[in-house]
Amino acid sequence: MSTTIERRRDDVGTPPPPPPSGGALRRTSDWARRAPLLPALIFTIVVTQLPFVVTLIVSFMDWNAYYPDERGFTGFSNYASVLTDVNMRQAILTTVILTAVVVLVSLLLGMGIALLLDRQFRGRGVVRTMMITPFLIVPVAAALLWKHALFNPEYGLLNGTLTAIWRLFGSDNAPQPDWISTAPLISVEIALIWQWTPFMMLILLAGLQSRPLDVIEAARIDGASSWQIFRYMTFPHLRRYLELGGLLGSIYIVQNFDAVFTITSGGLGTANLPYVIYQTFYQAHDYGRASAAGVVVVIGTILIATLALRTVSTLFQEENAR
Amino acid sequence: MSSVTNVAPVAATRTPEGEPRRPRKPRSGALLGLAAWLIGFLFVVPVLWMVLTSFHSEEDAATNPPSLLAPLTVAGYREFFGVGTGANPWPSLANSLTASVVSTVIVLLLAIPAAYALSIKPVRKWTDVMFFFLSTRMLPIVAGLLPIYLFAQWSGLLDNIWLLIVLYTAMNLPIAVWMMRSFLAEVPVEILEAASMDGAGLLLTLRSVVAPIVLPGIAATSLICFIFSWNELLLARTLTGTVAQTAPVYLTGFVTSQGLFLAQVCAAAFVVSLPVLIAGFAAQDKLVQGLSLGAVK
């Protein structure tokens, strides 16, 4: 009985081994199980982990491509310059503000819209599709769209709409703000919130639809108000989905490059860490400092990622327990 | 409004699907439905505006207030595709297509066996492996950019589409492993094992039991990986030049204003986004699962 089971396990190409000791049999069967996994695992380690190790090493080096003779190890001086440099500190601050604002606002909006979409109404599917659309615009294209077609002070849709509304009331003096120059960071944030709200909405809607409806129905029959049901039943259930959306959103937005690069080209105080790293290494060729800044981003991300992994893990275990 | 008469038949048609009928105040229900429509419309307006503007002439696109009813023309598209301007976006579109499709195929070739070893015949500590894959996706790309650039320079792979293919594969592999595992986990293992006892039943089982579960999963996974590769800018911008540049890199040519060019920008944005829009709407039901790396179904 047990032999047939063992045989079947290692039927992936390995010939039935000569009667070995129990340990050896188990080892071959273990390797037969691992074999399909190895290509993906090795590929991932080589392509994603190795470069980071190199980054870590270079971050301790004085290495500027313009001065190749001065290459050498300098200890923590790159980190010191990253953390004391005004531009770098500004970039760290910008990254934190940008990420926090975009994630929080799109989570709140996403939740409101998910609650609206969780109800039955005519054309719900159409509204859901309309809501997803912003997320399906290529990020660079979306940033171009906001920069040129919406924010442009002369012919952008925003100011155009203002003009139209003012004309409606017989006035020719509609305000025509230059959105990107007056509020550069907010402009970037608006474009990103527009793209990321659908993401949050999708995750939260999935959370809402996994609620145990019978319990909620029972509470309703027992006389619970809509607010009580939301406060004591829906919200606690949604909490983990809110966490997941917030954390995944943070991980993606901390890394954002496209919007900053396109809308403001890092100018006007909108340069976030990815953009500054790109500049430091691609234009200033200061490899050591760029690497140190990269390591700073990773440390920040690990903080968020640990929390994210924990949330995924909880959801994952529930999913598997079902 | 005719809300009262409208709500009743909808509720009646939905009840057979298991949704318990809720006694609601119809007025507030209709209002909330209207609010949902309004918000959905607000979110889609920029896209509609993009499409509409792309079919206007440059003069009509740059008016203030906007001329919604201006005559339609494909001049913007003609400009984008180089009629009279000498621009040629085709190589970058072809590069994007190559990078996205080839990397997606490699991702599937690596991810499906891996997902098999994580679900149907799981290795020991398979959850640890899953979380290792996930953690690599969370590592910011920008942190590994410099070594990759130096390696590319040293090996002569700068401006080579194959470098992007390898990197996009690594970028999407964690998502694909997580998604494929969640699909393979739904395969009834007992039936599979019983079928593998007699070889004749195995093919039939694969076709009639496994394929219906796994093929939609493969389709959804491919679409998500395709979208992520197609959208990528930072790696492409840093590692490609004139030969291997992708469509998003081509789009960065529109960052600085060049006189009257709004219709052309909108045409460009729409053309480059079209494959993602198609893939995204096709994968709509599985989009959440892919974006949350398989954590949410």
Image (spheres, rainbow, N blue to C red):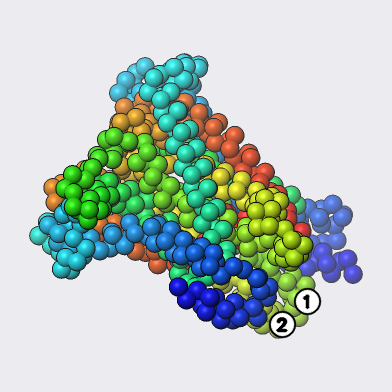
Left or right of residue B216, residue B121 in this image: right
For the residue labelled by badge 1, is the local secondary structure a helix, a strand or a loop? helix
Q: In which quarter of the image is residue B95?
A: bottom left
Mark 2 nearby-residue class (10 Å; few <14, some 14–19, many ≥20): some
Q: From what the image shows, is residue A47 above or below residue A16?
A: above
Location of mark 2 (residue): B201
Q: Position of residue B59 (x, y in %)?
A: 12, 57
Residue beneath the point at 37% across and 17% down: A70
Q: Is residue B204 visible?
A: yes
Q: From what the image shows, is residue B235 above or below residue B117?
A: above
Location of mark 1 (residue): B194
Mark 1 nearby-residue class (10 Å; few <14, some 14–19, many ≥20): few
Q: What residue type is labelled 2?
A: Gly
Q: Where is residue A213 in the image (x, y as percent from the top left)?
A: 70, 65
Q: Which amino acid does label 1 sit on?
A: Ala
Is there CB contact under 8 Å for labels 2 and 1? yes
> Depth check: A17 or A98 in front?
A98
Q: From what the image shows, is residue A298 above or below residue B295?
A: above
